Image (cartoon, grey):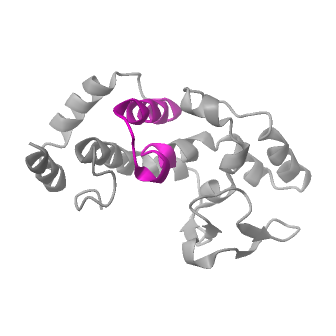
Amino acid sequence: MISSGEIDPDHPVDTSLVHRFRQEIVSALWENVLSDCQFFLKHPDDKGDHILVNDSFDIVGAIDWEWTQTVSKAEAFSSPCKMWPVAKFYRSSNELDADELPLAAVFCERGREDLANCVVGGRKVQRLFFALGTESSFLDMQTLSSLFAELRRAFDFEDMEWEVWKSKAFRKWREDGSLLGLLAVSE
């Protein structure tokens, strides 16, 4: 979709590099997850009102089925974006907001420490999905580089200026056909 111009037609090379990085780190979200063939449903624009659960916090349905996607437990139970400190999130904070902690506490009270851990450790998931910006569209490179820097910090990568990382990424993925195609079109 990046190559065809459906996602971020203004900065396709940069978006492609960020996407490629995300592909490499996504498995780190599920390092300690058992493959029990369990899946969860979540709306991609999660506001916390799209998943129906019972008293045991088992998912029993989802609202707006056409937009619901299958995700891991870590994704499904990280705090919804309406609880995030959005301004702080965009200004480089990976700390949980005071509004997110009661959600984790409710899960603990119900005997679901696993779900509480999804809330407490949720910034990695949130950073992964916001690394391409809201709806994968950037108005400026400052937003892209800022969101990307926080994604790298959330996954414990060294801090690096955007242009330095980008230069290293070009060298690393110099054989990538879709990236080469985007470079050819952009020149």
Residue 151 is one of the magenta-drawn residues: yes
Is 153 on the left-hand or right-hand side of 97? left
Residue positioned 77% across, 41% down in the render: 100
Image location (x, y in percent) of residue 112: 81, 55
| Residue ranking furthest to the front | 139
Where residue 133 appears, as percent x and y from the top left, is 46, 45
- In which quarter of the view is residue 88 placed? top right
Asked if residue 94 can be seen in this view, the reply is no
- What is the x, y in percent for residue 60? 76, 76
Location of residue 12 with respect to 68 vertically, above or below: above
**What is the chief secondary structure element of the magenta stretch?**
helix
Image: 16 above or below 87: below
Left or right of 4 in this view: 138: right
Q: Residue 166 lies in what quarter of the image?
A: top left
**Residue 184 or 151: which is nearer the viewer?**
184
Depth check, front residue: 42 or 67:
67
Expressed as whole percent of the image width and height from the top left, the position of residue 42 reads 62, 65
Residue pictured at 56% horizontal, 72% vertical: 67
Q: Quadrant of the C terminus?
A: top left
Quadrant where the N terminus lies?
bottom left
Compared to residue 55, the image places residue 144 above or below, namely above
Would you say residue 109 is visible in this rendering? Answer: yes
Magenta-colored span: 128-156
Q: How many numbered dots are placed on residues in this image?
A: 0
Residue in the foreground of this view, choosing between 56 and 167: 167
Residue name at image x 45 percent, y 43 percent = 131
110 falls in the magenta region? no
